[in-house]
Image: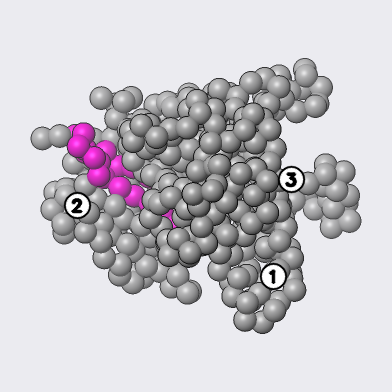
Amino acid sequence: MDNKYLIVNTGSASKKYAVYDKNGEIAFVHLETEEGGYISTIRILGKSETVKISEANFNKSLDYLIEILKSKNIVSNKDDIFGIGIRVVAPGIYFQSHRIIDSVYDKNLKIAEKKAPLHLDMIIKEINNLRLFFGKKIKMVGVSDSGFHSTMSEKVKNYAIDSNDAEKYEIYRYGYHGISARSIVNKLEKKNNLPSKLIICHIGGGVSIIAVKNGKSIDTSMGFTPLEGMVMANRVGDIDSGAVIYLSEVLKLNGLKLRQYFNKKCGLFGLSGGLSGDVRDLFKAEEEKGDIKATKALDTYVYKIQKQIGAYYVALGGLDMLAFSGTVGERSFRMRKRICSGLESLGIVIDQKINECMDGVDCILNTNESKVRIEVVNTDEMNQIAQETQKILS
């Protein structure tokens, strides 16, 4: 019997689990919130169904998962799982490699938690839950979300701070969404369609713009933590450090409360005056109500992305392909249209009719006149995590 691997990619409002063997995905279960309730999308051997679930199912997701897998004859019990792979988002040189999760890994996670507590707290809890559920002997792999960006040059990684402090505390630009970017590069390579100069727009709750040259990352918008870079759903993105100091003083925020402010109350949510961090809500408010704050939020969001695309056009020395991925990039034709409008000077010309017909499928969106290929490329982080996990545990 082939070894079965559980692949884990969880967030605060979404939990993704999948079971793989050497031949690929067997099962996929996605738990998420929807309109104040909870739903589960279950895909078994390519066939999908979506069902409503209870809050208890969501909170005790591993129990729910195993019951689903047992009912579909994927496993007889939890002991059929040979190993686990989990996406790890953590700053530090140590975490730029995929590694077995052991006592040394745990120690480094605790150190990294001080640098990015809101992201690492969730990952540490998930690892502990997995150990409690499957037993301490279960083999686990932490798959690095920053490893793809280890090819960035020193001039790209550096911040203009005291070099001794940077070295001592490992304060460098690491970048994230690397698992997603690697999956896109691999998909294009398999199709013999990988361009020399590629910009990936990974747009979801978090946003990364990634410059890829000959299959390797040369720059990315996220930095030391996933807070840097673009305007995101609730995250602040780039901000003057002087403004950070001032806000901490006038709002009397520091430490964890300041981190929560920049991670939870900013981005689209903050720009829209607390209306929403979801682009769907903002488009609706703009189109149906003419909401000025919604328009301001969307305009700022789009402008930052456009500006980053322009910067990476220069860094790459031109552009062969612009790829959209992530939930928003793959599903929102409005957002793709808004981003591409005004980029014609870079040779980026989108076919609006084709664009409006495409939702969540791989497709080509550029006109014949466009000098740059424009494509939607669905990311497959789960498959990428599975591949890296099997390499290490096989």
Residue wearing tag 2: 45
Rounded to the nearest whole Å, what is the CA distance between mark 3 and mark 1? 20 Å
> What's the coloring here?
one colour
Q: Earlier in the sequence, mark 1 or mark 2?
A: 2
The percent position of residue 210, horizontal first and vertical second, equals 58, 38
**Amino acid type shown at disc 2:** Leu
User: Which region is colored magenta?
Assistant: 3-25
Rounded to the nearest whole Å, what is the CA distance between mark 3 and mark 2? 42 Å
Badge 1: how crowded within 10 Å, few (<14), some, or many (20+)?
A: many
**Amino acid type shown at disc 3:** Asp
| Magenta-colored stretch includes residue 54 | no
Identify the residue shown where x is 71% and y is 76%. Answer: 291
Identify the residue shown where x is 16% and y is 48%. Answer: 75
Tell which residue pokes out farthest to the bottom in this image. 289
Badge 3: how crowded within 10 Å, few (<14), some, or many (20+)?
A: some
Judging depth in this view, the residue of 310 and 69 nearest the camera is 310
Q: Which mark is residue 294?
A: 1
The percent position of residue 253, horizontal first and vertical second, equals 80, 53
Predominant SS along the magenta part? strand
Identify the residue shown where x is 62% and y is 33%. Answer: 318
The percent position of residue 216, horizontal first and vertical second, equals 51, 26
Q: Earlier in the sequence, mark 3 or mark 2?
A: 2
- Residue 298's quadrant in the figure? bottom right
Residue wearing tag 3: 238
Report if residue 242 is visible in the image: yes
